[in-house]
Image (cartoon, rainbow, N blue to C red):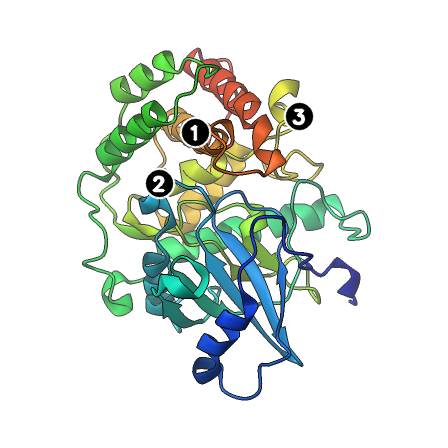
């Protein structure tokens, strides 16, 4: 199948998000070798956090990752952490880009950054590409494959990967609730929605630990996954590892399901979706949970909590992004609408709390 027109393409670098290419080339010359004098830089679309650039020189291509401009949440944009976990997963989890080089010299582009291999393929964002032409059955299989890769990640042997001392899995659920509630408070602006009901409910309904520690991605969603151009049902890459750690895999599942709209959801939630999971053929959250349990052997006994946590976490991230825009720390006009996104997510949290939302 020739789907070259569906290739996820980089475009022009956005205003205010460039860097001195000559300085970068001089630094990368001994790293990459060869003649890189004709290197060209483009920027991938999408993404509201770490920034991703495509470096091209002849037939050679690499990807550069750096933190966003104007961010005040350094722990969420730790390039060394992202580089370390990709290095550990290399040859164990076959979907991560291969890390090439990490740089902490801020004289090069003004921040930490790292290089990795470029995985060419299809990235599905808010809408399915009109010319992809998948049947409902194919969409269903594609999205089950998407979740199966998450289950594979949760099944990685921590000792084999050298990640058994990475992160702090004990007490992970409590720390996540504490941390995201604190981040919410730190990102509040005068026009912020009130999340007191959700915060109290999350504390009151916090489950015990699942008992399993896994590598978790912490932002596993469709536009962080690359599908094969030859076989669009097949996942060939997983991107954006900036928040990955070792922790409770059920919390990771909740993070993904926070993005998951389905046909039975309220219109206000479906209208704000960031990926096309409410399309004919797509599995429901209930079906996803059943398959996840089969693939991992883990029981998901408290789904409303994990789903509500996933939504609240996204509300916090949206508020953090809006905070940067509100205070003039970024000029990206896309960020202006994130205040509405936080309100929508909070509405969904309250519907879950009241028992009015289906799995």
The residue under the point 66% across, 19% down is 267
Is 195 left, or right, of 341 in this rendering?
Answer: left
The residue under the point 59% across, 39% down is 332
Q: Is residue 102 above or below residue 277?
A: below
Tag nearer the camera, 3 or 2: 2
Measured as percent of width and height from the top left, residue 216 is found at: 36, 50
Q: Is residue 253 above or below residue 191?
A: below
- Can residue 266 be seen in this snapshot? no
Q: Which of the two discs, 1 and 2, labels the residue nearer the N terminus?
A: 2
The dot on residue 307 is 1
Work out which quarter of the rendered image holds the N terminus and state it: bottom right
The residue under the point 44% across, 34% down is 317
Secondary structure beneath dot 2 equals loop
Secondary structure beneath dot 3 equals loop
Q: CA distance from mark 1 to mark 2?
A: 24 Å
Which quadrant would residue 252 be assigned to in this image? Answer: top left
According to the picture, the residue beneath numbered tag 2 turns out to be 73
Local crowd at mark 2 within 10 Å, few (<14), some, or many (≥20)?
some
Q: CA distance from mark 3 to mark 2?
A: 29 Å
Give the camera-side residue of 337 and 204: 337
Measured as percent of width and height from the top left, residue 352 is found at: 45, 18
Give the camera-side residue of 281 and 98: 98
Number of labelled discs? 3
Measured as percent of width and height from the top left, residue 196 is found at: 35, 13
Measured as percent of width and height from the top left, residue 344 is found at: 54, 20
The residue under the point 61% across, 75% down is 39
Local crowd at mark 3 within 10 Å, few (<14), some, or many (≥20)?
few
The dot on residue 161 is none
Secondary structure beneath dot 1 equals helix
- Can residue 75 be seen in this snapshot? yes
Q: Which of the two discs, 1 and 3, labels the residue nearer the N terminus?
A: 3
According to the picture, the residue beneath numbered tag 3 turns out to be 271
């Amino acid at each position: 199948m020739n789907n070259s027109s569906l290739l996820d393409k980089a475009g022009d670098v956005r205003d205010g998000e460039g860097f001195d290419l000559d300085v970068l080339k001089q630094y990368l010359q001994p790293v990459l070798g060869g003649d890189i004098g004709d290197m060209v830089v483009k920027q991938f679309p999408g993404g509201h956090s770490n920034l991703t650039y495509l470096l091209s020189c002849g037939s050679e291509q690499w990807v550069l990752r750096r933190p966003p401009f104007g961010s005040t949440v350094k722990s969420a944009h730790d390039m060394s952490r992202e580089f370390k976990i990709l290095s550990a997963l290399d040859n164990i989890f076959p979907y991560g880009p291969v890390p090439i080089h990490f740089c902490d010299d801020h004289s090069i582009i003004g921040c930490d950054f790292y290089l990795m291999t470029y995985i060419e393929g299809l990235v599905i964002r808010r809408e399915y590409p009109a010319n992809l032409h998948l049947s409902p059955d194919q969409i269903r299989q594609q999205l089950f494959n998407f979740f199966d890769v998450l289950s594979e990640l949760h099944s990685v042997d921590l000792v084999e990967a050298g990640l058994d001392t990475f992160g702090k899995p004990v007490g992970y659920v409590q720390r996540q609730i504490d941390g995201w509630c604190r981040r919410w408070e730190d990102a509040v602006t005068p026009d912020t929605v009130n999340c007191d009901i959700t915060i109290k409910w999350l504390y009151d309904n916090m489950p015990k630990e699942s008992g399993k520690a896994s590598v978790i991605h912490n932002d596993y969603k469709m536009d962080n996954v690359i599908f094969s151009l030859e076989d669009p049902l097949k996942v060939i890459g997983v991107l954006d590892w900036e928040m990955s750690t070792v922790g409770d895999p059920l919390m990771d599942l909740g993070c993904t399901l926070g993005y998951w709209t389905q046909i039975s959801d309220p219109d206000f939630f479906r209208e704000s979706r960031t990926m096309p999971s409410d399309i004919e053929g797509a599995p429901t959250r209930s079906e996803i949970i059943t398959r996840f349990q089969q693939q991992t052997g883990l029981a998901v006994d408290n789904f409303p909590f994990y789903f509500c946590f996933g939504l609240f976490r996204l509300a916090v991230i949206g508020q953090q992004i809006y905070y940067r825009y509100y205070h003039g720390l970024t000029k990206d006009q896309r960020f202006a609408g994130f205040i509405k996104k936080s309100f929508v997510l909070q509405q969904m949290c309250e519907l879950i709390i009241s028992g009015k939302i289906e799995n």
